[in-house]
Image (cartoon, helix red, strand yellow):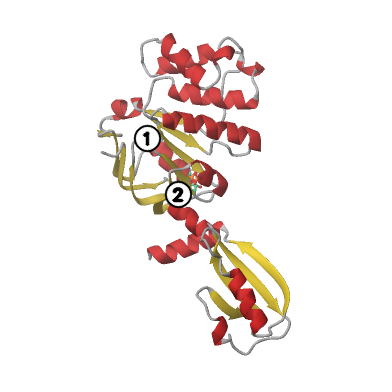
């Protein structure tokens, strides 16, 4: 299937001289949820802003369903909905009027039947005549999504959809996004929460310092996240790792006082039981234990090492 969005050699240098995006290539598949994961300042918002026509690229191109976002701006833009980071909504207006207005901004003919279906899908239909100020935080977020979908786009961008919101609200948003995907909307979200990318995405792209470092199916990437390190403090230092203990992922560290074992939590056998049996058989006494989950940084480094 043709990608719905094709990004080629995209770059952006702001007037200040900041290179926010450099040589980005990306194909976004129709109907997928793609999470762009990266630290603050990585270039995620810049990317979204370019695709949505809010920022002019310095080089490269983006096509949305074949329409160039610069040369064919209106056609490209009509296929995209954006839920921005900042919440700015008219508090005294009703839900229905808000989405009607958004649709009008796109020059689309009024279609209350479509908008009511949209509100129903977002569990907002019973609030259609409520003023926004009367809604809960979760409902307000859903109104933002309704606004972004009011003109019937095929692609929805969510910029940091759950930054600073509580866990319940986060789950609520995830649920809504999944339902949209099930209806065929392609969703691209940015996040700096590992958990969010893990929970939501079909694919994850990692952006760092304006570069898209890699894009992978979530399962493949989570395999990396599934690694843990077991640190075993020994009572007596070892001069070297006994050959009988030698196994992939096991090293002797800290002047022989620590054994560090990297293992995959998702594998059928972690190898930990065998390791302890081996220690017992060798008469090696253990003083203390600690396990550490790979941090995002570990994963970055490991993946970047692989990608190099
Ligand atoms: P993210 O969304 O990943 O946090 P941004 O795309 O907002 O990253 O920012 C990428 C880089 O570009 C940062 O260094 C940021 O300071 C810079 N930047 C963003 N917007 C502007 C702007 N309008 N003018 C100048 N620099 C900007």
The residue tagged with tag 2: helix, strand or loop? helix
Give the numbered dot on residue 218: 2
Q: Is residue 86 above or below residue 140?
A: below
Is residue 10 in view?
A: yes
Circle 1/circle 2 CB separation < 8 Å: no
Spot occupied by residue 183 in the image (x, y as percentages of width and height): 41, 27
Q: Is mark 2 within 8 Å of ligand 1?
A: no
Q: Residue at x 46, y 15 (%)?
A: 117
Give the numbered dot on residue 31: 1
Q: Earlier in the sequence, mark 1 or mark 2?
A: 1
Kindly indicate the quadrant of the structure image that contains residue 255. bottom right
Q: Residue at x 42, y 30 (%)?
A: 182
Camera-nearest residue between 203 and 7: 203
The residue tagged with tag 1: helix, strand or loop? loop
Query: How many residues crowd mark 2 within 10 Å: few (<14), some (14–19), many (20+)?
Result: many
Query: Number of callouts in the render?
Result: 2
Q: Residue at x 70, y 70 (%)?
A: 289
Is residue 83 in view?
A: no
Q: Is residue 71 above or below residue 117?
A: below
Q: Is residue 253 above or below residue 105?
A: below
Q: Is residue 163 above or below residue 260?
A: above
Q: Is mark 1 within 8 Å of ligand 1?
A: no
Side (left or right) of 279 relative to 248: right
Spot occupied by residue 165 in the image (x, y as percentages of width and height): 63, 36
Return the residue found at the far bottom: 239
Kindly indicate the quadrant of the structure image that contains residue 133. top right
Camera-nearest residue between 116 and 228: 228
């Amino acid at each position: 299937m043709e990608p719905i969005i094709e990004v080629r050699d995209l770059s952006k240098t702001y007037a200040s001289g900041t290179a926010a995006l450099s040589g980005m290539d990306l194909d976004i598949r129709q109907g997928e949820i793609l999470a762009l994961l990266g630290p603050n300042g990585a270039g995620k918002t810049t990317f979204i802003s370019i695709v949505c026509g809010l920022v002019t690229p310095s080089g490269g191109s983006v096509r949305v369903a074949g329409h160039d976002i610069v040369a064919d701006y209106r056609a490209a833009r009509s296929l995209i909905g954006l839920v921005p980071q900042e919440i700015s909504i008219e508090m005294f207006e009703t839900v229905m009027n808000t989405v009607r207005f958004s649709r009008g901004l796109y020059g689309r003919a009024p279609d209350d039947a479509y908008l009511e279906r949209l509100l129903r899908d977002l569990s907002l239909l019973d609030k259609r005549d409520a003023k926004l100020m009367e809604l809960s935080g979760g409902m307000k977020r859903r109104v933002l999504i309704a606004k972004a979908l009011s003109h019937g786009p095929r692609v929805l961008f969510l910029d940091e959809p759950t930054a600073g919101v509580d866990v319940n609200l986060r789950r609520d948003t995830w649920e809504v996004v999944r339902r949209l995907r099930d209806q065929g909307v392609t969703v691209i979200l940015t996040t700096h929460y590992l958990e969010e990318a893990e929970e939501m995405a079909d694919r994850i792209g990692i952006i760092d310092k304006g570069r898209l470092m890699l894009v992978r199916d979530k399962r493949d990437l989570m395999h990396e996240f599934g690694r843990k390190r077991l640190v075993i403090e020994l009572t007596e230092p070892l001069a070297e790792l006994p050959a009988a203990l030698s196994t992939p992922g096991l090293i002797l560290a800290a002047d022989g006082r620590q054994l560090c074992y990297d293992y995959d939590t998702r594998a059928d056998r972690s190898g930990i039981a065998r390791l302890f049996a081996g220690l017992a058989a060798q008469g090696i006494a253990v003083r203390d234990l600690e396990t550490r989950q790979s941090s995002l940084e570990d994963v970055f480094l490991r993946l970047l090492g692989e990608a190099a």
